[in-house]
Amino acid sequence: MLRVLQGWVDDASAGRWFTTPQRRLERRSPIEALAAGDFEEVEDAARAWAAAQG
């Protein structure tokens, strides 16, 4: 997931994204979603968030 964000946002913003609840992830943080095994959902959410930043 980090590779999806690299080049789109700075490292600090990417780090905050991983710990902030996300609407696309049913209000879970990406870390929580990854721990639950929802890898594809997190990747999709990361792509959408990165695209919205640029």
Image: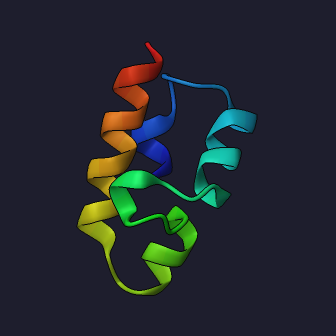
Q: Is residue 12 above or below residue 28?
A: above
Between 10 and 18, the one nearer to me in the picture: 18
Q: Is residue 36 above or below residue 23?
A: below
Q: How many marks?
A: 0
Q: Position of residue 6 (x, y in %)?
A: 51, 33
Q: Which quadrant of the view contains residue 42?
A: bottom left
Please indicate whether residue 43 sits to the left or right of residue 35 in the image.
left
Q: Position of residue 54 (x, y in %)?
A: 43, 12
The residue at the point 35 percent across, 84 percent down is 37
The residue at the point 26 percent across, 50 percent down is 44
Q: Is residue 45 above or below residue 8?
A: below
Please indicate whether residue 48 sits to the left or right of residue 22 in the image.
left
Please indicate whether residue 9 sits to the left or right of residue 38 in the image.
right
The residue at the point 57 percent across, 25 percent down is 9
Q: Which quadrant of the view contains residue 46?
A: top left
Q: Which residue sits furthest right?
A: 12
The residue at the point 48 percent across, 54 percent down is 22
Q: Position of residue 23 (x, y in %)?
A: 41, 53
Please indicate whether residue 36 sits to the left or right of residue 11 in the image.
left
